[in-house]
Image (spheres, rainbow, N blue to C red):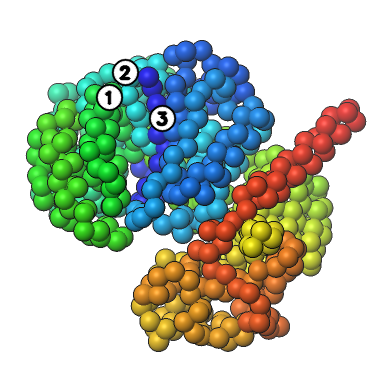
């Protein structure tokens, strides 16, 4: 049985594996292979797949029961619209209540309500979301894989060309993919310490053994453990003639992306889990599994809590048990020297990759206007803007480097540069300032359908927190003092201002977003707050019921949010059918 598991993971973004010599030829090969995989996936989209042709099961992990239900609904809708291969078992499993490694997509809040794996991409007809892209990019794996499980993340993209060799998962134990990266990138990712290669020649794919896995190491640690390599000699052969080899003296490390566990290893971990009645700490499939592997692995990492959000009393004990459980498990690494790794987990990465990254655009065939209605687009939107499944009035305008997804913009709506507008309906005259984030959520409060719209600046840090109200001056929203903004909005500072943990006060759990009975009223009020922050007429909202983003996610109405997207979908389909019939 071949199973794909998509999970959440915390990490910084990067693009790695960029080869300076023969760059054009190697990029062309990556692009060609990527397009082949996309075409192969499109050929089975909405069709019954045969046994062995595709994954036996696709498993998505959710943070809680509510998110599990949201994911299940979205999978069901996709199957109904025939956007996924049929005849596959799609499962969603939620984590038990308790500590979480992740942070509810705080760095990409438009994915917080419905999940990063369902992030819309400017690609495909109907549009791809991250789940389709993952399935497309990995389409060659099931046929080259022994029974087992492949573990991947919801917010990254791995593109590669392996030359004449195929990526295979036939070895026992655990096999991981690795990508050449700079040492700086290595400090925010997992890094492999590999056995020396048997060949001195450059190869697009290398099968290597791994001595040690380092989790977000320092550059000094990488050097001490032998993780740093010098990029190999390589040659180009673009027109059939061998060119002179040139040594590249740049230092690289090999960083992680996804990994495979064979059936025996999965059974070992399953037996371990069953021994525990309840796990009272969250285990990281990357940091806690992979650091236990390799002949040079030691127990030292089990007591390192540097990257742990909240330390539970059971954590170190469980880590040690996992270390002894996995110790001696075969650990191999497939090095993809001609590969690209893109992370789309922050607002800056999201905006850059969707609007400005010419390489990713060429590799995936990304478009600036996907499955949308936008008359007079050439006049009112820059080609570096991105419109995804949205309906825009002919008199609306969108500035460069902005993304509009699942939204409706009326006449006289102007969106500034570097904005994200998500799941919103803006029908009033509006000038959305540059670097603004606007996203609406449907809420179910006391069995009543309500709405709230999140607004803040793209540069704002939603995760930064302080421990007391007296420290609020150090928080900023829209680039200015949070306390100053509260005054403009007539919101009083008190213990009731924040939800959740009262020792971690942040923009994420600040009750500053008004709850309204209609979507349009919600958008209007939040835009007034946004304009007040830009020294426009004041928006007094302190008298209203206010929620934090944290609270909104706990009472979100997934059904209504998906219904809004479906209405946009039907309107766009109808418009296209009318256009087709006109010819």
Labels 2 & 1 near each other (Cβ < 8 A): yes
Q: What element carries label 2?
A: loop
Residue at the image position 22 percent from the left and 30 percent from the top? 268
Q: What element carries label 3?
A: strand
Q: Is residue 1 visible?
A: yes
Residue 331 at x, y percent in the picture: 19, 30
Q: Is residue 211 visible?
A: no
Query: Would you say 186 lies left or right of 368 here?
Result: left
Q: Nearer the N terminus, badge 3 or badge 2? A: 3
Q: Identify the residue under disc 3.
A: 4
Q: How crowded is mark 1: few (under 14 residues within 10 Å), some or many (20 or more)?
A: many
Picture layout, residue 252 above or below residue 202: below
Q: Distance between the residues labelled 2 and 1?
A: 7 Å
Q: How far apart are marks 3 and 2 (CA)?
A: 13 Å
Picture layout, residue 78 above or below residue 13: above
Labels 1 & 3 near each other (Cβ < 8 A): no
Badge count:
3
Report the disc number at residue 262. Answer: 1
Q: Nearer the N terminus, badge 2 or badge 1? A: 2
Q: Nearer the N terminus, badge 1 or badge 3? A: 3
Residue at the image position 28 percent from the left and 23 percent from the top? 263
């Amino acid at each position: 049985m071949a199973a794909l598991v998509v999970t959440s993971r915390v990490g910084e973004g990067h693009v790695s594996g960029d080869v300076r010599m023969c760059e054009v030829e190697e990029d062309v090969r990556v692009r060609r292979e990527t397009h082949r995989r996309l075409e192969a996936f499109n050929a089975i989209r909405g069709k019954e797949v045969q046994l062995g042709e595709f994954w036996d099961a696709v498993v998505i992990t959710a943070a809680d029961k509510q998110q599990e239900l949201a994911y299940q609904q979205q999978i069901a809708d996709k199957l109904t619209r025939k956007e996924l291969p049929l005849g596959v078992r799609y499962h969603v499993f939620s984590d038990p209540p308790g500590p979480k490694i992740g942070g509810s997509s705080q760095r990409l809040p438009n994915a917080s309500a419905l999940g990063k794996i369902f992030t819309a991409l400017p690609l495909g007809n109907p549009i791809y979301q991250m789940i389709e892209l993952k399935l497309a990019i990995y389409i060659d794996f099931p046929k080259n894989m022994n029974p087992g499980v492949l573990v991947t993340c919801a917010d990254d993209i791995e593109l590669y060309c392996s030359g004449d060799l195929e990526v295979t998962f036939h070895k026992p134990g655990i096999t991981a993919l690795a990508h050449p990266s700079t040492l700086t990138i290595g400090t925010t990712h997992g890094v492999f310490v590999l056995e020396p290669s048997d060949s001195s020649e450059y190869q697009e794919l290398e099968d290597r053994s791994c001595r040690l896995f380092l989790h977000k190491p320092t550059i000094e640690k990488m050097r001490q453990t032998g993780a740093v390599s010098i990029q190999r000699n390589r040659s180009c052969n673009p027109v059939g003639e061998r060119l002179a080899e040139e040594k590249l003296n740049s230092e690289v490390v090999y960083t992680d992306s996804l990994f495979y566990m064979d059936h025996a290893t999965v059974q070992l971990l399953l037996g371990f889990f069953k021994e525990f009645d309840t796990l009272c700490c969250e285990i990281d499939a990357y940091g806690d599994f992979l650091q236990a592997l390799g002949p040079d692995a030691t127990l030292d990492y089990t007591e390192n809590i540097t990257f742990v959000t909240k330390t539970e009393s059971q954590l170190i004990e469980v880590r040690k048990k996992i270390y002894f459980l996995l110790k001696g498990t075969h650990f191999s690494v497939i090095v993809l020297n001609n590969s690209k790794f893109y992370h789309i987990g922050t607002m800056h990465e999201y905006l850059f990759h969707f609007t400005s990254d010419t390489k990713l655009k060429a590799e995936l065939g990304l478009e600036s206007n996907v499955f949308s209605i936008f008359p007079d687009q050439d006049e009112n939107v820059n080609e570096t803007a991105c419109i995804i499944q949205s309906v825009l009035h002919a008199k609306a305008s969108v500035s460069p480097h902005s993304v509009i997804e699942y939204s409706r913009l009326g006449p006289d709506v102007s969106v500034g540069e570097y904005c994200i507008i998500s799941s919103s309906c803006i029908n009033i005259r509006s000038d959305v300032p540059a670097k603004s984030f606007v996203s609406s959520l449907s809420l179910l409060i006391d069995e009543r359908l309500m709405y709230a719209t999140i607004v803040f600046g793209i540069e704002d840090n939603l995760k930064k927190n302080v421990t007391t109200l007296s420290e609020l001056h150090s928080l900023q929203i829209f680039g200015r003092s949070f306390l100053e903004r509260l005054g403009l909005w007539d919101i009083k500072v008190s213990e009731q201002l924040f939800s959740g943990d009262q020792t971690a006060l942040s923009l994420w759990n600040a009750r500053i977003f008004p709850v309204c009975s209609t979507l349009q009223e919600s958008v209007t009020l939040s835009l007034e707050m946004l304009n007040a922050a830009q020294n426009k007429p004041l928006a007094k909202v302190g008298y209203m019921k206010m929620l934090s983003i944290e609270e909104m996610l706990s009472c979100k109405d997934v059904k209504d949010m998906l219904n809004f997207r479906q209405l946009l979908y039907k309107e766009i389909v109808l418009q296209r059918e009318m256009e087709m019939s006109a010819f």
